């Protein structure tokens, strides 16, 4: 991003705006937009970011942006909430410029724990849909993105970096 004077960044599922705030600190010249489906989260993010970014209510599966308008899309700790992850992945790909990158961080569990948690999720009231394996995330994102790199973060997280060719 250093070679782009004012990169355009989209934070999908921005929640309270914590990651957006960190991105603004790391990339002070960026033009940042955050979206979240929850009106309460949008209000909290707006309060935290205090006009330094545009924050709007929107669905990750129906992003309200033109094609190819962002240099970077980040999605942290929200992909497991999306009922149609293939559509969400396509939408993130669609709004990226050619050469842009997706950075996705989400929960991860080894197979036995993941199976138990996924069986429990229909009874959860947290909006969780599915915890994905490395293979599943690579397949979902690999449909649209090139060079999908997956890595485990700590005991219960993963980080995926994918590029739009």
Image (cartoon, helix red, strand yellow):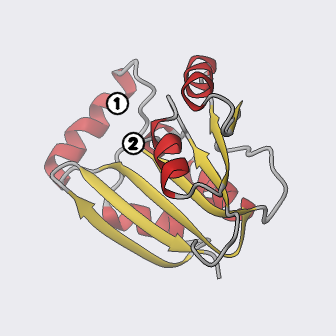
Marks 2 & 1, CB-CB < 8 Å contact: yes
Q: Secondary structure at mark 1?
A: helix
Q: Return the residue nearer the eye: 51 or 60.
A: 51
The residue located at (47%, 46%) in the rendering is 79
Q: Return the residue nearer the eye: 89 or 97.
A: 97
- 80 sits to left or right of 69: left
Q: Position of residue 19 (x, y in %)?
A: 46, 43
Q: Return the residue nearer the eye: 99 or 1.
A: 1
Q: Position of residue 107 (x, y in %)?
A: 31, 46
The residue located at (35%, 69%) in the rendering is 150
Say above or below: 57 vs 75. above
- Which residue of the protein is positioned furthest toward the right in this rendering? 66
In 3D space, how far apart are the residues under numbered discs 2 and 1 (Cα atoms)? 7 Å
Say above or below: 10 vs 122. below
The residue located at (64%, 56%) in the rendering is 9
Q: Return the residue nearer the eye: 136 or 8.
A: 8
Q: Position of residue 138 (x, y in %)?
A: 43, 69
Q: Which mark is residue 100?
A: none
- 155 sits to left or right of 128: left
Quarter of image, res 18: top left
Q: Which mark is residue 121?
A: 1
The first of marks 2 and 1 along the sequence is 1
Q: Secondary structure at mark 2?
A: loop
Q: Residues within 10 Å of mark 2 (few under 14, many from 20)?
A: many
The residue located at (47%, 37%) in the rendering is 81
Q: Position of residue 94 (x, y in %)?
A: 73, 63
Indicate the quadrant containing the C terminus: top left, top right, bottom left or bottom right: bottom right
Q: Which mark is residue 130?
A: 2
Say above or below: 13 vs 98. above
Indicate the quadrant containing the N terminus: top left, top right, bottom left or bottom right: bottom right
- 90 sits to left or right of 17: right
């Amino acid at each position: 991003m250093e070679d782009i004077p004012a990169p355009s960044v989209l934070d999908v599922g921005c929640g309270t705006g914590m990651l957006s705030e960190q991105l603004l600190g790391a990339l002070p010249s960026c033009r940042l937009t955050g979206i979240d489906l929850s009106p309460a989260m949008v209000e909290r993010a707006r309060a935290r970011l205090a006009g330094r970014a545009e924050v709007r209510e929107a669905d990750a599966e129906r992003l309200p942006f033109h094609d190819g308008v962002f240099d970077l899309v980040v999605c942290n700790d929200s992909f497991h909430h999306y009922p149609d992850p293939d559509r969400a992945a396509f939408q993130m790909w669609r709004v990226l410029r050619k050469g842009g990158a997706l950075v996705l961080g989400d929960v991860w569990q080894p197979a036995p724990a993941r199976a138990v948690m996924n069986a429990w999720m229909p009874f959860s009231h947290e909006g969780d849909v599915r915890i994905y394996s490395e293979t599943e995330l690579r397949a979902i994102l690999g449909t649209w993105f090139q060079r999908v790199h997956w890595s485990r973060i700590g005991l219960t997280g993963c980080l995926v970096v994918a590029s739009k060719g």
